[in-house]
Image: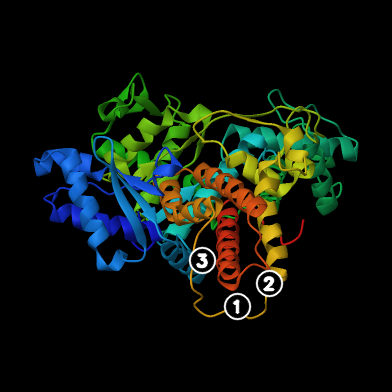
């Protein structure tokens, strides 16, 4: 926990006293609300954690720790009581002055509150979505996009230098099938139809690509489709790829997702990097020939078996391109590589780490979050591409804000079932509306506030339990951000925002803000400002807007 956060500063004071009592090997002090709010605002079990190394009874150590805390000059007027409970818990009751100072610090930090906690900051290269440019992104890609972009935002907020990359799978049989599929639709337009190949692409979007290409070249290729002229096939494949990739980029931009680079798999083959990568492994003794094929010794690095790099006919496998791509990425100088992959890629993790190790890189630099499947509870959604629900369909139905929030509000490690009926609601049952309404409601309160707040007002003489709970929630925001960063878990941001919204709504219904005594009004206005700031920055981490009116 950051020592610069309100709770972090208190935890640092506790750690200092714990060390003075003989706990040199003290673990990080964790402060959490006690099970019963009547016992205080925060509690710590540090005395029990230190008892063995200090060779003292936990409760005796807790009594001394509580006494030391109440005697600290920097906590005078801020700590009302420190009491020992059970086998050695220390319960802390904080004074209104502590809450007021915590609020002022949060307000002063603004939308940067909780930022910059990376320890240490790293250069991170994150690759996500990486869909084949043979069709529009579907809801599975949408979940990867929402997760990958939100994670990148969280990492940047923490202080890491982040580069976002899209790996374009534009080489091999699937691209040729796509080119012939586009050519077949083009043939329908110019009056020389040819069949769509077996395993080809049938969606209406293919016809759209063909119409666009017909607009570019007219009937130039009318007589060159059956048999397929190599120049015609190259044109429909390459230009089809370009238009499809342009459409994908447009849909991602609409979804508030950006990439810094689009890396072409085909470029690796054309530059000879795939053969070079395979050769590097073979020369290093990490690949061997057997049964006419070239095999990577993946089993030596924890994979379940060795993997083919080059088939007996001389063609390379998809893994060979992955070898070249990951060796190329590792050589760029990033401290951390993150590959966001779909649920069908579990087997890739061990072999990709093995590739890095065999190439002389630290395999631990690679992280591979696996994104589980997503389904839709209400399938009454307009589909432009047959049975596939596209990202475009999803945004048209529930909007960007709901789509992004719903796609990251559960851990990426669990399957997700989106309730579209709920996402369409404009009520507090919808978690997006529930959180966004906090920001809009606060904007309305602040519009009624006096134009010139008092400077350094005295704290209120007493606080409502709802005020205490809300300030403590805000004070814990840096810890929630830190957890989201270290666990690569943007869903922790969503969960914390929902909890914060609940605490604010409880405060709103219990505590009038404008029109109270000056010190009460000033405190509650600061509480509103701090809440709005955290909601705004938290939603931004998820790519969701914070409206001022709803």
Q: Is residue 458 left or right of residue 137?
A: left
Per the rendering, the mark at residue 460 is: 3
Crowd rating for badge 2 (residues with CA inside 10 Å; few <14, some 14–19, many 20+): some
Q: Secondary structure at mark 2?
A: loop
Q: Residue 275: x, y in percent?
A: 40, 41
Task: Identify the coloring.
Answer: rainbow
Q: Residue 49: x, y in percent?
A: 21, 40
Of tags 3 and 2, which is closer to the observer? 3
Residue at image mark 2: 449
- Residues marked 1 and 3 touching at CB (< 8 Å): no
* First in residue order: circle 3 vs circle 2: 2
Taking depth in this image into account, of 166 and 199 the one nearest to the observer is 166
The answer to whether 174 is drawn above or below residue 331 in the figure is above
Q: Quadrant of the C terminus?
A: bottom right
Q: Secondary structure at mark 3?
A: loop
Q: Residue 152: x, y in percent?
A: 50, 52
Of tags 1 and 3, which is closer to the observer? 3
* First in residue order: circle 1 vs circle 3: 1
The answer to whether 30 is drawn above or below residue 123 in the figure is above
Residue name at image x 80 percent, y 34 percent = 383
Between the C-alphas of marks 3 and 2, the distance is 18 Å
Q: Residue 162: x, y in percent?
A: 45, 57
- Residues marked 1 and 2 touching at CB (< 8 Å): yes
Per the rendering, the mark at residue 116 is: none
Q: Is residue 261 left or right of residue 399?
A: left
Examine the image and state in which quarter residue 529 appears.
Answer: bottom right
User: For the view shown, which residue lies furthest in the right direction?
Assistant: 191
Number of callouts = 3
Q: Secondary structure at mark 1?
A: loop
| Residue 234 can be seen in this image | no
Residue at image mark 1: 453
Between the C-alphas of marks 1 and 3, the distance is 15 Å
């Amino acid at each position: 926990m950051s020592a610069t956060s309100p709770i972090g500063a208190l935890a640092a004071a506790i750690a200092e006293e714990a060390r003075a009592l003989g706990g040199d090997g003290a673990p990080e002090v964790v402060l959490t609300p006690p099970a019963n709010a009547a016992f205080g605002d925060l509690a710590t079990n540090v005395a029990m954690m230190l008892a063995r190394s200090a060779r003292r009874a936990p409760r005796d150590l807790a009594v001394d720790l509580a006494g030391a805390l109440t005697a600290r000059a920097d906590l005078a007027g801020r700590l009302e009581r420190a009491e020992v409970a059970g086998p050695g818990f220390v319960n802390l009751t904080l004074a209104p002055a502590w809450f007021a100072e915590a609020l002022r610090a949060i307000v002063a930090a603004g939308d940067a509150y909780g930022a910059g906690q990376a320890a240490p900051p790293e250069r991170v290269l994150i690759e996500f979505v990486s869909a084949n440019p043979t069709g529009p992104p579907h809801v599975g890609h949408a979940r990867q996009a929402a997760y990958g972009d939100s994670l990148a935002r969280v990492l940047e907020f923490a202080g890491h230098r982040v580069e976002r990359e899209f790996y374009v799978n534009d080489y091999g049989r699937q691209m040729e099938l796509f080119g012939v599929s586009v050519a077949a639709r083009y043939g329908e337009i110019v009056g020389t139809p040819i069949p769509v190949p077996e395993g080809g692409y049938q969606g209406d979007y293919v016809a759209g690509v063909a119409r666009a290409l017909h607009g570019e070249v007219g009937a130039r290729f009318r007589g060159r489709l059956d048999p397929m002229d190599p120049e015609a096939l190259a044109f429909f494949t390459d230009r089809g790829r370009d238009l499809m990739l342009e459409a994908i980029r447009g849909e991602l931009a609409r979804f508030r997702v950006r990439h810094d680079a689009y890396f072409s798999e085909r470029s690796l083959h054309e530059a000879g990097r795939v053969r070079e990568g395979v050769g590097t492994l073979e020369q290093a003794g990490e690949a061997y020939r057997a049964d006419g094929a070239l095999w990577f010794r993946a089993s030596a690095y924890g994979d379940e078996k060795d993997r083919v790099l080059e088939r007996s006919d001389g063609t390379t496998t998809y893994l060979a391109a992955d070898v070249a791509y990951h060796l190329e990425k590792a050589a760029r100088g990033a401290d951390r590589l993150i590959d966001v992959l779909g649920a069908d890629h579990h087997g890739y993790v061990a072999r990709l780490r093995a590739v890095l190790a065999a190439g002389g890189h630290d395999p631990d630099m690679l992280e591979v979050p696996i994104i589980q499947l997503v389904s839709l509870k209400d399938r009454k959604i307009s589909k432009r591409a047959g049975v596939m629900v596209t990202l475009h369909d999803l945004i048209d139905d529930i909007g960007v804000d709901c789509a992004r929030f719903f796609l990251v509000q559960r851990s990426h490690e669990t399957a997700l079932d989106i309730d579209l009926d709920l996402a369409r609601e404009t009520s507090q049952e919808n978690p997006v509306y529930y959180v966004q309404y906090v920001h809009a409601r606060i904007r309305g309160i602040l519009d009624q506030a006096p134009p010139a707040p008092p400077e350094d007002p005295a704290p209120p003489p007493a606080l409502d339990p709802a005020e205490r709970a809300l300030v403590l929630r805000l004070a814990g925001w840096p810890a929630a951000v830190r957890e989201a960063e270290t666990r690569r878990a943007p869903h922790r941001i969503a969960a914390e925002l929902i909890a914060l919204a609940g605490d604010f709504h409880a405060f709103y219904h219990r505590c009038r803000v404008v029109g109270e005594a000056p010190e009460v009004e000033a405190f509650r206005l600061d509480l509103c400002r701090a809440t709005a700031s955290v909601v705004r920055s938290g939603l931004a981490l998820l790519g969701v807007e914070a409206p001022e009116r709803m």
